[in-house]
Structures are given as structure tokens and as C-alpha cells.
Image (cartoon, helix red, strand yellow):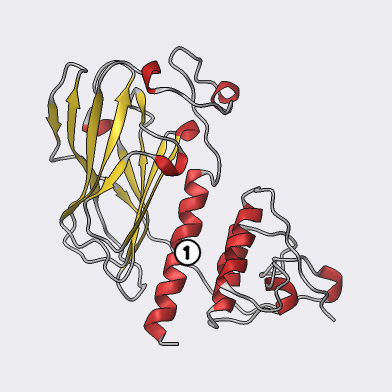
Amino acid sequence: MKTADVRYKVTVVGLVVATCLGAGLGTYQSRDEGEPAGTLERLVTHLTPAAAHAAGSCDVTFRMTSAVTLGALIVEANYSAANGDFDGDFGSVDCTDLSNSSSQIFNDNEPVDLLGLSFFGPTGPSGPTDLAVCTFLPDGAAPMPGDFVQTIALATNLMGIPVPVVQVIASDIDCSGVGVTTTTSSSTTSSSSTTSTTMSTTSTTLAEQVCGDADGDGQVLATDALLVLSAAVQLSQCEVCICDVDGSGATAASDALLALQFAVGQEVELTCSSCV
């Protein structure tokens, strides 16, 4: 396997891990107009019909202003200052890719007002460029660009090396039926941070064996899923009795996904052989 291919696979799974965690994997939660926004009320799971929102909608365009070419980018847009929600649930949020990236993932975690925009692949976003346009349903007045605060959760170049400074803004808001036609911003900035993951080789004694616990700390977390993937693409070592969580007899990328689902509380079962 070529080194570039391995780096790409690890970058993609790292991207999926971060995106799933940010978006609340497999959970759709929202509230109807008029409900209190307390924690308990916002955790009640139900479908919210579009009619519950005020008439009209807004197209929010997210733009990367930095002149960089990326292999992976995860943007978290906090819209808690905006009055309303993005159209669509969890993985079905109404967003359209404008970046021409090889792959994209869009997720909306309504209980925490966080929209996840992820772009990756051999052909990632090359800035400055528009990344995506998403439909926002306001409960009243049209939102302003400053109501959307972008944080860069992950940005790497085509070789998987972190890029330290990337800016993404809500550049245009085009509304109809809510009193404001178009709002354009040229000054909103995003906070930027980089993340890195250290691949390590671990060993686990029989007495401490926990299926899927690749780092040996006694519990299965998202970081373990990334380590399982690292073992699957032969960047690190992990005993089959720990990282082969589906009992197939070999460690594969599918084991990493299963470990991730378990880590975020999905009802899945991890099955490992005994370490003897």
C-alpha cells in the first residue's frame, strides 16, 4: 500500500470520527416553535414539520477565504445566536456542496445548534472558494452573518499535515418571505484550531482485555476507533483479539466503524476472541 493512500485513509476516518462526534451519531433531536429551550425539552426526539417555522427560508453560504488547498476540512458552525434551525434532520440537512471536493458530509445537531460541514478526498477544497449553501428556517427575523460562528475542527493538506490557519465565514444570506432579501458579510471571521492524533502501538494483558479498547485504558472511546483503523491499514499494531471487534478473524476498517458506533452509545455489540 502506498504511503499517500494510507495517509488518506487515516485522514478520512479521522474526519468521520470527528464529524460523527460533533453531529451526535444516529440521533435526531429538535423542538417545535413555542417550546422552551431548556435542556430537558430540547432532548425530546421528534420530527418538526417545516410549517412550525415562520414562513420563508434563507440560503446561508459558507465560504473559505484562505488561499489554501486542503485534503480534509471540518467546519463547525454554531448558530445558537440565530433564531431558527437548518432545514432537515441529522444527516439529511439541506446543504449543497459548492467546493467541488471529492466527498462531503453535512450534519445538523439541533440540540446544541451546531452544523457540521466536512470536505475530504484526493480533491479537497481549494480556496478562496464557496464551500456550501444550506437552507435555514428562521423563527421570525432573518439571521445575520454574525449569528453564525465558525470553528475549524480539522484542516489538513493533501498529505494529511495540519494547516494552522484557515478561515471560514458565513459570506451571504439570501432570504425570501422573512422581510430581508439579501445580507452579505465581508468581515466575519472564524476561530481556527488544528488537531492531531498520535498513533501508538499498544498491548493488553488477558486480565485487562476489553474488546475494542485499542489504547488499553479500560474503555472504548472514539480514539480507540481511530487506532483500530490505524491497525487495519498497517500503520500500527493491535492484537486481533482487541481490534477485531466483529469476530471476523482480521482487523479491517469496518471494525473501526463498529468501535465508533459503540463509543458514541449506539446499540451495537462488539465481539472479540480471547487473547491467549
How many numbered discs sit on the rendered protein?
Answer: 1
Note whether 237 is above or below 264 in the view shown: below
Q: Which of the pair 267/118 is nearer the observer? A: 267
Residue 13 is situated, as x and y percent measured from the top left of the image, at: 48, 65
| Residue 147 as seen in the image, left or right of residue 250 | left
Q: Is residue 143 visible?
A: no
> Could you tell me which residue is drawn at 46 percent across and 71 percent down?
10
- Quadrant of the frame with the C terminus: bottom right
> Could you tell me which residue is drawn at 60 percent across and 23 percent down?
40
Mark 1, Cα crowd under 10 Å, few <14 / some 14-19 / many 20+, is: many
Q: Which residue is label 1 attached to?
A: 14
Residue 184 image-quadrant placement: top left
Note whether 226 is above or below 27 in the view shown: below
Residue 208 is situated, as x and y percent measured from the top left of the image, at: 82, 69
Residue sitting at the far top: 34
Residue 134 is situated, as x and y percent measured from the top left of the image, at: 28, 39
Dot 1 falls on a residue whose secondary structure is helix
| Residue 174 as seen in the image, left or right of residue 19 | left
Note whether 49 is above or below 86 in the view shown: above
Q: Is residue 209 visible?
A: yes
Residue sitting at the far bottom: 1
Residue 232 image-quadrant placement: bottom right
- Quadrant of the frame with the N terminus: bottom left
> Could you tell me which residue is drawn at 35 percent across and 72 percent down?
161
Residue 112 is situated, as x and y percent measured from the top left of the image, at: 47, 34
| Residue 25 as seen in the image, left or right of residue 116 | right
Disc 1 marks a residue whose amino acid type is Gly
